[in-house]
Image (cartoon, helix red, strand yellow):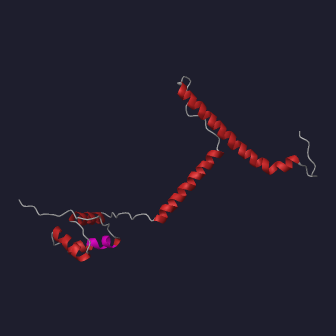
Amino acid sequence: MMMAHISTVTKGPYIPWSPEEEEILPTWVSRNEHLPWDEIREEYVRQFKIPRSVHSLRGKLDQLQKGHRRKRPISKRAVELHHIAARQARHQQQRLWVVLPASPPPLNLKKANPQVRRLLRQMKQLETARSYTSARSLLLEDDSQNFLSQVWDSSGEKMSPG
């Protein structure tokens, strides 16, 4: 039994399929379906001057018949916009961490080893410091706005404390 030789490899770099090629391929192959695949490949290369293997032609035709199209690469502008949005989201998250109260440590082990106890103590100190700092910054904002009204009365004379 003799098998037909099907060339499946094209030497050279990969050449992406253009939308125009994807558009014409199904009708072009149907017009030439009377030819064996080796001759279809040769005719395609001769007509379009784009080296495609039999495997590439058949694979792309199969994808197109199933309704699959290769996604186009994302433009640099879209990538830049994605990076900007991600950066803004990170900054917003960091601002939320400053404003939100600190949460209790996730672990509270009574008989933990010394390293775990030390880490838990450090976490608690950091969260306490963070909540103190965020509460203090909020108080300072309020104090800076109301400072003059607390120190001076409406006549411009200094008020006595307490």
Task: Please indicate, yes or no, whether residue 108 appears anywhere in the rendered image.
Answer: no
Relative depth, front residue between 5 and 158: 158
Q: Number of marks in the image?
A: 0
Residue at image point 75% right, 46% down:
140
Quadrant of the rendered structure where residue 56 is? bottom left
Q: Is residue 18 left or right of residue 113?
A: left
Residue at image point 65% right, 36% down:
128
Which quarter of the image is occupied by the C terminus? top right
Which secondary structure is most common in the magenta stretch?
helix
Relative depth, front residue between 66 and 90: 90
User: Residue pushed farthest left?
Assistant: 1
User: Residue pushed farthest front?
Assistant: 12
The verdict on residue 129 being magenta is: no
Which quarter of the image is occupied by the N terminus? bottom left
State the image coordinates of residue 89 (x, y, percent, origin top left): 56, 53
Q: Is residue 102 left or right of residue 139?
A: left
Q: Which residues are magenta?
A: 20-26
